[in-house]
Image (spheres, rainbow, N blue to C red):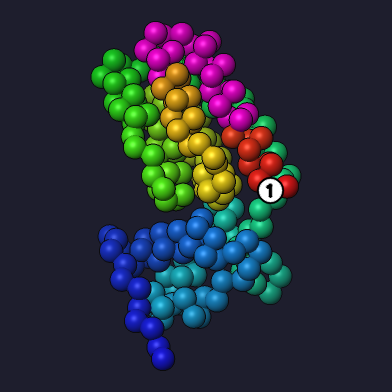
Amino acid sequence: MTSSPVELRFTTKAEAVYDEIRSRILRGILAPASPPNQDALAPELGVSVTPVREAMRRLEAEGLVQVHAHRTVVVSPLSLSELSEIYDVRLQLDPHAAAIATAKASEETLERIERMARTEVSSDPLEQATINRSFHRAIYVESGNGLLIEILDRLWERTDRYRIMLVSTEIDVKTVVREHLEIVAAMRSRRSRQVAKLIRAHVMKARASIESALD
């Protein structure tokens, strides 16, 4: 029996296919190290194989899939070495960007960031990871440094699957909310060094939790 195509509601077919496949990778529906069947995905998503291939190229640029010899595509495996490399860089850049943002952000922006910190926790791992990502991005974009923002965007994209795994195993996600509120309070007091310290501790805790989950 043939299943009906998945209904995609986005601006373009290419964008729709990309978002759907990316979501499946992040949720683990397309498992790490598995080869996505592009020929099967196309009719399932109600498109030709071309948008699927375009999506794979975008996902390869994000590090979510790998293209091996003979053009075989596989979902990138989870790796402690990759995790270590990414977080080594983030431990330097996240606190730095947040410290700059503390000095630059307007009171109105800080109020918005605080509202984001108070967003209700979601039971859906992908949604909760998105909430967390939105909070942190709202901070580092206030650094006003385009290159720094671009690098952090890429780093966060590479760790999406790891963070979703962390949310899935986290005993008390509300602890993260409390830490977010502490960061906002320090920002509103314009204590740049304290903000950097809190962000660094926050990132280190996430790293340790993910490493433990991977083990």
Q: Say above or below: 79 vs 146.
A: below
In this rendered view, identify the residue nearer to me: 211 or 94: 211
Residue 137: x %, y % from top left: 42, 33
Q: Amino acid at mark 1?
A: Leu
Residue 190: x %, y % from top left: 41, 9
Q: Say above or below: 95 vs 59.
A: above
Q: Say above or below: 32 vs 37.
A: above
In this rendered view, identify the residue nearer to me: 138 or 164: 164
Neighbor class of circle 1 (other Cα within 10 Å; few <14, some 14-19, many 20+) is some
Q: Is residue 67 left or right of residue 123?
A: right
| Main SS of residues in magenta | helix
Q: Say above or below: 123 vs 20.
A: above
Residue positioned 31% across, 71% down in the render = 7
Q: Is residue 119 left or right of residue 206?
A: left
Give the magenta-colored segment's residue range: 184-205
In this rendered view, identify the residue nearer to me: 173 or 70: 173
Residue 179: x %, y % from top left: 48, 24
In the rendered image, residue 194 lying in the magenta stretch gets the answer: yes
Q: Secondary structure at mark 1?
A: helix
Which residue was labeled with disc 1?
Answer: 214
